[in-house]
Amino acid sequence: MKSSELKQKYLDFFKAKGHAVIPSAPLIPENDPTVLFTTAGMHPLVPFLLGQPHPLGKRLTDVQKCLRTDDIDEVGDKVHHTFFFMLGNWSLGDYFKKEAIEMSFEFLTKVLKLSPPHLAVTCFAGDKDAPKDDESAQAWLKQGIPKERIAFLPKKDNWWGPPGTAGPCGPDTEMFYWGSSAPPPKIFDPKNKNWVEIWNDVFIQYHKTTEGKFLPLKQKNVDTGMGLERVTALLQGFDDNYRTELFWPLIQEIEDMTGKCYDQELVSMRIIADHLRAAVFILGDERGVVPSNVGQGYILRRFIRRIIRRMKVLGVNSGSVSLTSILARKTIEMYSSEYPLLKEKKSFILEELEKEENKFKKTLEQGLKEFDKIAAQGKMISGKDAFLLFQSYGFPLEMTQELAAEKNIKVDVVGFKKEFEHHQELSRVGAEQKFKGGLSGASAETTKLHTATHILNEALRKVLKEDIKQRGSNITPERLRFDFNFERKLTEEEIGKIEAEVNRVIKEKLEVVREEMPVEKAFQSGAHGEFGAKYPSRVSVYTVGKNYSKEICMGPHVKNTVELGKFKIIQEESSAAGIRRIKAILEK
């Protein structure tokens, strides 16, 4: 079964079960500082998991573009990826464990025709915070999964969330399929690598407080996730995701460019294919960013530089040719029929890749000079120096070792690993800080700032020009950040006028009204949407005043502008070519 057929069968199955199909949200989240990228299908749906009604009802399904960097060091094996597609279905306070498990089992065995004797599941074992999930286990037994094929595991294995220090969370049940040609053992051992995890049903039934208590939720939700790449490989009889049509044409392109065979260069070719696909989808996203030293731009830069390093490992010296551009063309060709935005943004994607590749070539040259300086100092390259070459010049350890071997010099590998682990720990702590606040917290502060972005958007149109469109936003409990199309730096006078206009609207004590309507009607009524965003067939429209500001939005918002306090712009700067960025706060 092709991946496109699997996607369609999944959506059709859940549509027949009363689920509305919603479009994939962008890779770069809106108004959510908790994560750099959309890491799961539930992220864009957090307000609805917390109780806000969704315009399309209580049952939803989609195929979501996702990106996770926590597995970046695992990429190179058969199954790990940074960018991937997640098949998902949700119940927002509708059905729960029994029905979710029945539907999962029916899809796996009746639609995908997977053999029930080759299935096994895990459930939550229970702890001081929540009881053992016997309800899920009983539901699986009723489907015919034998007791020996049900394993109970602790929180680290069978619990989801919250994504921050507080928020919705709950136990999950994971489904595994026996991937070996040998007969599956009678007793399920989750540690046996032949059992491949294929699907996860999460039961969001608790709210973790900031004090660490787990309180039952009034609205209990189901959130499921099935990895397209892994299940496609399984259905096609591969134990290697990169041999499916989701990667193989790109692997063949890499073989042609390098003159080497995939079977002999598995790790390097997988890393190149994975990172190239991720880079293309980041650049080709509705809220696409460019390579930089911070946030999403830093991750993108890291992907591109790792691709170039791996091409060097394979012995390819590009000269004046952009290797990443050649591979990007193939990726766009592979995916643009399902994701036409990639074709629309093709020139932008290719230009940014080429620019970053040229920058890195210069960095590599500088790195080689630095290596020669370090190598001239003695018979051993210290862990600190090896890590300096890695962090500042993009040299992987193996590259430093190869260069050192040519000069009969050793590298302190243990010292390098210590430096690397220290760096990872700092990065982890930094990443955890990303999980404070955001829409998952839905605090009064973020709600106010969210409403303020709507008024700001309209104020920009009134003060600057009518065709201004939102190009992205990010909200923390402390401040809002708003990106919009404009060619030049704003003057002090313009900034003052924008501030005054927003504060005028706040003082007018205008009501903020939410309506649900078909997306076509929303646009016909004059509602604004984010540039390039895809919307479901039915949407929420928020109107400030009788008709001051009218926008398609997923919320949350205040009831009246008077709740906002005083609006103050603290910074105005360039975000990208033709895009300006405003940072602002609300004072009491």
Image (cartoon, rainbow, N blue to C red):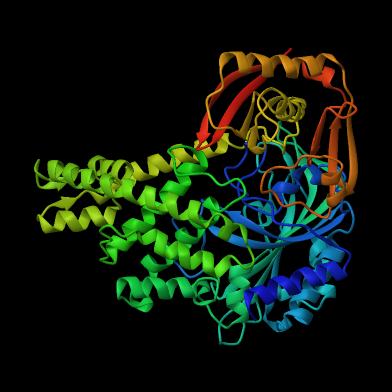
Q: How many marks?
A: 0
Residue 449 image offset from top left, x and y in percent: 72, 26
Q: Is residue 458 above or below residue 426?
A: above
- Quadrant occupied by the C terminus: top right
Q: Give the residue drawn at x 88%, y 59%.
A: 95
Q: Give the residue drawn at x 14%, y 47%.
A: 380
Q: Is residue 406 rendered to the left or right of residue 303? A: left
Q: Is residue 444 above or below residue 151?
A: above
Q: Quadrant of residue 344?
A: bottom right
Q: Quadrant of residue 398?
A: bottom left
Q: Of 219 and 131, which appears nearest the observer?
A: 219
- Quadrant occupied by the N terminus: bottom right
Residue 530 image offset from top left, x and y in percent: 70, 42
Q: Of 285 and 67, which appears nearest the observer?
A: 285
Q: Give the residue drawn at x 45%, y 65%.
A: 273
Can residue 5 be seen from the camera position used here? yes
Residue 385 image offset from top left, x and y in percent: 23, 41
Residue 75 image offset from top left, x and y in percent: 45, 61
Can residue 75 be seen from the camera position used here? no
Q: Of 397 and 447, which appears nearest the observer?
A: 447
Q: Is residue 501 above or below residue 196?
A: above
Q: Give the residue drawn at x 53%, y 24%.
A: 489
Q: Is residue 401 above or below residue 151?
A: above
